[in-house]
Image (tube, grey):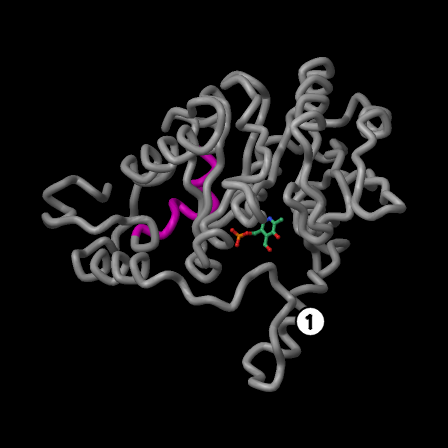
């Protein structure tokens, strides 16, 4: 059978393998995915039921419903130190789809992405799918407990084929949370070397004591080569809804939007719609 080498050589997800063994077995407590055991809050489920009944069942905008993009931009502006505009928000059918879109946008065969590890394995796979090299650089474990990022070692792992640096914080699986000082150091490195920074912040609200974990959005300028990957899955208990978003520089937005058409042709309208009083067609909600 003739298929692409990078797909033939790709290992199947071990997480998917394990989950397939226990899925649906009432005797097994499912700890294989990064998800809680609480159902989606009723206020969200009710709004989706109303959206379904109001006819939000058509294809929708590739970059996401304008109202949702604005709401996300306002949410981030309130939460983080710097304003984000809706022209930087791209709604995706999950963070995983967002990561795959990022990989498709940045990685040519032979390029590499430097990845802070230990890490949830799917980002490495997204790079491999494109024929790129996931280059893992391990955090140092601190004897007293916890982890430390060696920015010098990360810099040394970058070469002429490095397209960017990937950081997942708060981290799955270590729980490591990047500090504001480390964020500043990585932003400086990316600016100096002309690299993309990809920050997976899907667990950014699941922290003790604080409103949110330190974010690259606290410090970055809008024109920084920064892509922040986010999701409704974790903080809003919506793993099965498949809805997430990317925050990108405004000039990258149309490039990724093009790719949405050929991946998902837009995210689920029902998951993204808010409760409306009038019929969606009269409000021009679908294309
Ligand atoms: C670090 C990390 N990023 C992204 C995802 C995927 O999130 P989504 O459900 O939005 O695809 C996960 C899921 O486990 C994760 O652990």
Q: Is residue 118 left or right of residue 31?
A: right
> Is residue 233 found left or right of 192 in the rendered image?
left
Looking at the rendered image, the quarter that the N terminus falls into is: bottom right
Furthest residue toward right? 143
Q: Residue furthest front?
A: 209
Q: Residue furthest top?
A: 192
Report the residue at 55% width, 49% height from top.
206
- The percent position of residue 215, horizontal first and vertical second, equals 57, 33
Image quarter of the C terminus: top left
Q: Secondary structure at mark 1?
A: helix
Q: Is residue 268 magenta?
A: yes
Percent coordinates x, y for residue 86 in the rendering: 36, 28
Q: Residues within 10 Å of mark 1 (few under 14, many from 20)?
A: few
Seen from the viewer's position, the closer of residues 69 and 286 is: 69
Instruction: Give the magenta part as a residue range.
Output: 258-269
Q: Residue at x 10, y 43 (%)?
A: 282
Q: Residue drawn 30% across and 55% down?
A: 270
Residue appearing at x 52%, y 45% in the figure: 205
Residue closer to the observer: 75 or 197: 75
In the image shown, does 83 or 166 lie closer to the viewer?
A: 83
Residue that mark 1 sits on = 18
The answer to which image quadrant residue 186 occupies is: top right
Instruction: Place residue 34 in its image quadrant.
Output: bottom right
Please state the horizontal and vertical placement of residue 47, each as a whole percent of the image.
Answer: 25, 57
């Amino acid at each position: 059978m003739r298929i692409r080498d990078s797909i033939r050589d790709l290992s199947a997800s071990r997480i998917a393998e394990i989950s397939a063994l226990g899925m649906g077995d009432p005797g097994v407590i499912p700890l294989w995915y990064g998800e809680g055991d609480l159902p989606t809050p009723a206020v969200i489920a009710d709004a989706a039921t109303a959206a379904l009944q109001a006819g939000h069942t058509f294809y929708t905008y590739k970059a996401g419903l304008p109202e949702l993009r604005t709401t996300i931009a306002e949410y981030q502006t309130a939460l983080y130190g710097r304003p984000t505009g809706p022209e930087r928000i791209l709604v995706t059918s999950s963070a995983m789809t967002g990561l795959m879109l990022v990989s498709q946008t940045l990685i040519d065969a032979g390029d590499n992405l430097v990845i802070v590890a230990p890490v949830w394995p799917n980002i490495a796979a997204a790079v491999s799918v494109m024929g790129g090299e996931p280059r893992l650089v391990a955090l140092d474990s601190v004897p007293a407990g916890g982890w430390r990022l060696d920015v010098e070692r990360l810099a040394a792992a970058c070469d002429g084929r490095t397209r960017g640096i990937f950081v997942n914080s708060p981290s799955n699986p270590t729980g490591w949370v990047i500090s504001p000082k480390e964020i500043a150091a990585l932003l400086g490195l990316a600016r100096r070397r002309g690299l993309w920074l990809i920050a997976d912040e899907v667990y950014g609200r699941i922290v003790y004591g604080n409103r949110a974990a330190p974010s690259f959005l606290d410090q970055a300028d809008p024109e920084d080569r920064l892509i922040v990957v986010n999701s409704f899955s974790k903080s809003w208990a919506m793993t099965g809804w498949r809805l997430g978003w990317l925050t990108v520089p405004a000039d990258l937005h149309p490039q990724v939007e093009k790719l949405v058409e050929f991946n998902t042709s837009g995210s689920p309208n029902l998951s993204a719609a808010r409760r409306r009083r009038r019929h969606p067609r009269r409000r021009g909600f679908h294309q």
